[in-house]
Every structure is written in C-alpha cells, then in structure tokens.
Image (cartoon, rainbow, N blue to C red):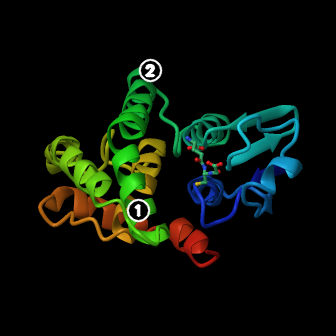
Amino acid sequence: MIKLYGSARSRAARCMWMLEELDLTYEHIPVSPPEASTQMAGICPTGKVPALTDGPVTLFESLAINLYLAQTYGRGRLWPSTDIGMGLVYQWTLWAATEIENPIITIVVERLFRQQPDEAAIAASEKALPRPLKVLDTHLSASSYLTGDSFNAADLNVASILASARIASIDLSGYPAVTAWLDRCLGRPAYAAVNARR
Ligand SMILES: N[C@@H](CCC(=O)N[C@@H](CS)C(=O)NCC(=O)O)C(=O)O
C-alpha cells in the first residue's frame, strides 16, 4: 500500500490532495520533523516531510511525489496524454517551485510561526511576488486551467502553493483571474477532504 509521511499541516497536504483526487487508498503517517527522521530512516535522506513509498518506490519532494502519482495513476485524468501537455505540467510545476514558493513560504513562516517576524524578509518576499503573479494572471485570463480547459496536476501543484498565500493573508485581489481559478481549484471535494483533516 502507498504510505505518505508528513502531517496534514505540512507540505504533505498537497500530496494528500493528489491522493484524494486519484481515489487512491493510502496509509497516512502524520509525522513532523525532527521525530519524522526516525520513522523515515532509509526513505527520506533530507529528514523533511513529505515522503512517500509505493511498493519499491521511495520518493521525497512534494511536487515530485505529485508528478509521480499523477503520471502513474492519473493518466487521462490529472495527467495529460500528449507530450506537450506533459511538458506544460512540468513547466508550471517548476515555475511554481522556483518563482513563487519561496517568497510565499517565507511570508507564511514569518507571519504565522515567528514570535518576532522578520519584516525585512516579508517586505522582500512581497516585492518578489507581483511579477510572477502577473504572469499567472495574464495566462489564466485566457484559459480556465493552466494547461487548457480542465483541472490537472499542474493546477493542483500550483494551487497548493497559492493556498498558502491565502493562509498568510497575502493580498491576491489585484489578480482576478488567479483568484477565480484558485477558488475553482480549492473548491474541489478532494481539497475539502484534506482541509477537514488539518
Ligand atoms: N522542497 C521540499 C520542502 C520540504 C520541507 O521543507 N518540509 C518542511 C515541512 S512543510 C519540513 O519538513 N521542515 C523541517 C526542516 O526543515 O527540518 C518539498 O516540497 O517537499
């Protein structure tokens, strides 16, 4: 059986979202670092969550886990059937990981977890976000979902990062197409099922 390590309050939530979308049966081990590293010995060398095992397969990195799950179990649903479709899923996933995740997570950590938030770090992150968010907004002004007219792994991966922006009260009101798309993505029953377990 598939096993997913990581609390629903961590980045493991995005993998839970994918598992729920795909209707997969899995065992959830809701561990958090640093204790998690003992339970993930031999599975996850980083000691960070999430990590996943699926028979002989062991994986870490939340977005890579989601690409694996969608490609393995979601063909024709969350995984596209064309080469260009697959390329676009990788494009948007890597774009999100490199262009928006770091500033968003910095703001989340500083606003929600620090007794004395580093205001300079928050300001620098806020300054970094408008450029990529404008790119996303322009793209979504002409397309219901990231790679076309249906929800797939690209939307799930990018929306799972932007969901954190909402949690940290990052103002997205200047990006109406992003906001409408994010509402569509986060309105899915599979996301609600994960959210209920946080
Ligand atoms: N890029 C990694 C980041 C993993 C990560 O930083 N996870 C956090 C929880 S959301 C963690 O385990 N932090 C503990 C630590 O940094 O030691 C991924 O997406 O899986």
Q: Residue at x 87, y 49 (%)?
A: 38
**Left or right: residue 193 compared with residue 131:** right
> For mark 1, does the 10 Å Cα neighbourhood hold few (<14), some (14 to 19), or many (20 or more) residues?
some
Compared to residue 16, the image places residue 86 above or below, namely above
User: Which percent across, then down, holds residue 112?
Assistant: 44, 70
User: In which image quadrant can residue 105 be found?
Assistant: bottom left
Q: Residue at x 44, y 20 (%)?
A: 83
Q: Nearer the viewer, residue 158 or 37?
A: 37
In the picture of the structure, the residue carrying the numbered disc 1 is: 110
Mark 2 = which residue?
83
Q: Position of residue 169 (x, y in %)?
A: 30, 71
Give the residue type at disc 1: Glu
Q: Give SS at disc 2.
A: helix
Q: Residue furthest top?
A: 83
Q: Is residue 36 visible?
A: yes
39, 159: nearer the viewer: 39
* Structural distance between the alpha carbons of marks 2 and 1: 40 Å
